[in-house]
Amino acid sequence: MHVVVIGAGEVGTSIAASLASDHEVVVVDIDSDRAEQLKYELDVLTIAGDGTTSEIQTAAEVGRADMVIACTDDDQTNLVACGTAKTLGDGFTIARVKSTDFLRTWEGNEGAFGVDFMVCTDLLTAENIVRVIGLPAAVDVDPFAGGLVQMAEFEIAEGSPVAGQTVSEADRFESLTFVGLFRDDEMTIPRGDTDIMVGDRAVVIGSPESVQSFATDVAPQTTPDHADEIVVVGGSEIGYQTARLLEERDFKPRLIEQDPDRARWLAENLPNTVVMEHDATDTEFLAREHVDEADIVVTALRSDEKNLLISVLAKRLGVDRVIAVVDSPDYVTVFEEIGIDIAINPRTVTAEEITRFTYESVAENIAVLENDQAEVLELELTEGCGLVGRPISEIVADTDVRFVIGAITRNHTLVTPRGDTVLQAGDHVILLVESDAIGAITSMA
Amino acid sequence: MSITIRVGWRASVELTGDVLAALPVPLAFPLLLALYYGESPLPFLAAIAVSLALGAGFRQLRDPDTDLGPREAFLAVALIWFLVAAVGAIPFVVAGVGTVAHPVNALFEAMSGLTTTGATVLEDFSLHSRSVMMWRQVLQWLGGLGILILATAVLSEIGVGGAQLMESESQTQDVNKLTPKISRTAQLIWGIYFGLTGLAVAVYYLLGLAVDPRMDLYNAVAHALTSVSTAGFSPEPLSVGAFHPVIQWAVVPFMVIGSTSFVLIYFFINGEPMRLLRNEEFHFYLGAMGTLASIVALGLFLDPGAGYGAEATVRHAVFNVASIVTTTGYASTDYVQWAPAAKHMLFMGMFVGGMVGSTTCSIKSLRWLVALKSFRRNLYTAIHPEAVRPVRISGKPVDEGAIRDIYAYLLLSIVIFFLLTVVIVVDAERADLRVTEFEALGAAATTFLNIGPAFGDAGPYGTFASFPMSTRAVMIVLMWVGRIEIIPVLVLFTKAFWTS
C-alpha cells in the first residue's frame, strides 16, 4: 500500500512508524529539519514542503496513493490537504481535527471536505476517558458507527447478580442486544433461555448508555453508579466533551474551570453538570467542595504540569481513581509511576485510532474476539446487496451462517434490530459473526 | 443655552398619524351597527372626523430624514396608546348619555378598553345604545391586536425598524421570529388572532342557539371580541354570569388561549405541538391557574354562605380564577360576596398574568418563573459560592442581563402598585369616601395590571364611577403605563432620552 502522511508531529510520526515496516510510506512536513531528522529515524521517504499544495502532493505521488492521512496540528490544513488529495487521485483520505464542529459537518454529509474518515482528537480522548471511567469491568470495549454503538465484552465474575439468570432476564434494556456467550472458549449464540454462568464471557452490542447500564448489572461493585462523584478539572475541549458524554450516560459530574467566560459557556451547555468557577489548585477550595471524597477525578487542564499537580493532590486527598490527560507522550509513564491510575495522551489515542483504521479493510470496522473465534463487523449496506429489503428473521432463516445483528444505525440514529426489522441501503449494521463465516457474510453485503 | 433634541420625534408622530388615520376602519363597524339599529351615527362620525384630521395633521410633520430608532419607537408606542384612547373616548362624549359622557370618564372607559383592562365607569348599562356598547368591545379587541403587534411582530410598513418596537413593549421576550421577514410573521400572528376571534363568535353563537337565547349574534360578537383579547368588557351588566353555565364554560378556553403565547400557538397549529406542551412558562401559567382555582373551589365548598351546588362551585372557581389570571376581567358571579379567603386568592391571582407574546397583561408568568428560578439559584450559590449556574427556561439559559431587568421590573411594578394604593386611600379620604384597605389594594392592582374589576363598589357588577374623579385620572395614566410595560413611558421622563 502506498500511504502519504501529511504532518510529522507526534501523531504523524507514530502512524508512520507503525506502517513503515509493511507499507510504502511518504511523510510530508513543512519543517525541513523535521523531515530530514525523520529520514534517519524511520524507513520512509520524507518530503519538506506545504502538504496542502498540489505541487508537493504530486511529488509525494498522492495520485497513486491508497491512503492519505492528514494529521498536522491545524484543522484547516488537514481539511485542505484532503481536499487537494481528492483532486489528484482516489486514495482513501483521513483527516485529524480538533474541532467537533467540523466533525458534525462531516457526519452530516460523509465525504464533505474530501475527507473519507475523520478523527476528532478531543472527542476521541473524551470517549476514551469515559470508557475507562464507566466500564472498568469490561474486558474489551470497542466503539462502532462513530460512537453511536458500543460493543463490550464482560466476564461474569463470582457474585455477579447476572450469574444464574437467563439471557432474557439479564437483557432488560431496550437498545441492547446479547450477541455472543463464550464458555470454556466455546462460542454460543445466546437464545432467550440460555443460562448465564460464572466464568462466562458475554458480548453485548448496543447504545453506550445501555451498555453502561448493563455493566452496572454485571459488576455493581466496580462499575460507577450514578451516585458516584466524578470531578472533571479543567474546561478544555476534552474536559467539556468528557462531561458531556458523562451526562449522556446519566452521570452528574462536576467541572472546575477558572476562566469566568468559559465557565459560563460550559454551564450553559452542560445542563446536568455543576460547573464551578475557581482555581483547582486551591486546596482550601477542594476541601470545602469535598473533592477529596470524590470517587473519580479527571484532570483535563491545558498544561501537563498543572494536571500533574492536581492529580498528585487528588491522590493525596484520598480520591479513589485519578485519570490524567497528558499532552506530552513522554510523561505518560512518569504519571503512572507516580501513582496516577491512568494517563491518557490525546496524540497516542489519535494515532492508535488512525492506525487501527489502516489495518482494517476500508468498509469495515472490526473487533476480534476470543482468539479469533468470532468478529464483530460494521457493514455499510449498499443498494442491491443480499441483505437489503428483507426482514432480519427471513435472512436468518435462509442461511446456515451463524451471525447475530447487534445494532443498526440509520441516518446517525440507532435502530434496535428485531425479527421484523427490514434492512435498508445505507444502514450500518453491526453484527457478530463466527470467524469462518466472515466471507459468507461479506459476500452478502 | 440651547438644548438640542436628539429624538427624531417627527418619525414617532408620523407613525402615530398613520395609526390614527387607520382608525376609521374599526370605527366603521359600530357606525354601520348604529345605522342598522337606527341609532345616532353622530358619535362615530365625530370620532372618524377627528382621527382623520389628526392623522393628516401628524403626517404633515413628516421628516424624510429621521428614521425610526429605539427612542422613536418608545415615543411612538406611548403616543399611539394615549391618542387612540383619546379618540376612542369621543363617541362616549358625543353620545352624551350617563356617567360616561363626562370627558374624564369617557377617557377612563376608552383607556380601560384599549389597554384591555375592562374596568368600567358605566352605572346603568340599559341607558346606552347598542352601537356605543359595541364600540367598547371593538376598542378592547383593537387593544389586544395592538399588543400582539408589539409583542410578536410589527407594523409591516416600517420593516426592519419595527423590530425595535417589539423590544420596547416586551423586554423579556426572546424575539421568536417565525419567518425571516417580520411583516410575514406579523401576518401569521394576526391570522391566529382573527381566526380565534371568529371561532369564538361561532362557538358562542351556536351554543346560544342551543341553550340560551340571550346569546344572540350581537352578544356572540361582543364577547368574542373581548375574550381572545383577554379584555373583559361585556354589554351585559352581569357579565358572562348573565348566560347559561354551558356558555360560561365555553368562554374559559378562549380566555386561556388568549393568554397563551401566540408564537407557540402558531407552532402548535403547524405540527410542532411539543414546543408549547413542553414550555415551562406554559406549565407555570397553567399550574398557577390550576392551584388557585382548586384553593378557591375548596374555599367556596367550605363556605356555608356560598350556597352553590357542586358544579357551580367548580365553575365559579375556575371561571373567575381564569378570568383574573388571564387578566380578562369577566365574572360569572358577584365574587364580592365571597368569603375573604377566596377573595384574597383572586387578589393574588391578579399579579400572575399569562404568557409573554399573548394579549395578557399583568406581570406575566415568564417574569415570575425567571425570578423564582434565579432566587433558587441564589440559595444554591450561598452554599457553593463558586458554582456557575445559568437560569434555564425550557432548557435554554437566560441571559444575566435579562434577569436583572426582570428583577427591576418586578420591583418597579410592586412600588408603583403600592403608590397607587396609597393615592386611592388618601384621595378617598379627602373626598370623604369610605374605601377599605383591601378594596384600595384591589382597585390599584386591577387598573395598573390591566385586569378589570376589583372588590367592593368596584367589583365585577359595580362601577369605578364611585371613586373620586381625581383618582380616576390617576388610574387612566397607570392603565396606560401598565399596559405598555412601564419602561416606554418612564424613559420619556428622563433627560437622557431627549438630549443625549
Image (cartoon, rainbow, N blue to C red):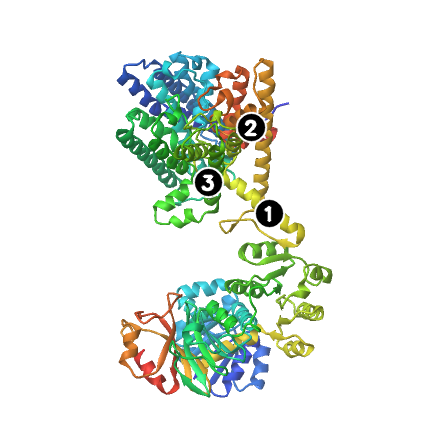
Residue pictured at 28% horizontal, 82% vertical: A399
Residue wearing tag 3: B290
Earlier sequence position, callout 1 versus callout 2: 1
Q: In the structure shown, which secondary structural element does the residue marked by tag 3 occupy?
A: helix
Q: Is residue B295 above or below residue A266?
A: above
Left or right: A328 with respect to B89?
right
Give the label, 3 or 2, closer to the camera: 3
Q: Is residue B242 above or below residue A225?
A: above
Q: In the structure shown, which secondary structural element does the residue marked by tag 2 occupy?
A: helix
In the rendered structure, the residue with mark 2 lies on which chain?
B
Left or right: B306 with respect to B496?
left
Give the label, 1 or 2, closer to the camera: 1
Labels 1 and 2 touching (C-beta < 8 A): no
Residue B11 pos. (x, y %):
47, 29
Residue wearing tag 2: B492
Residue wearing tag 1: B376
Earlier sequence position, callout 3 versus callout 1: 3
In the rendered structure, the residue with mark 3 lies on which chain?
B
Q: In the structure shown, which secondary structural element does the residue marked by tag 1 occupy?
A: helix
Q: How many neighbours does mark 1 have within 10 angstroms: few (below 14), some (14-19), or many (20 or more)? A: few
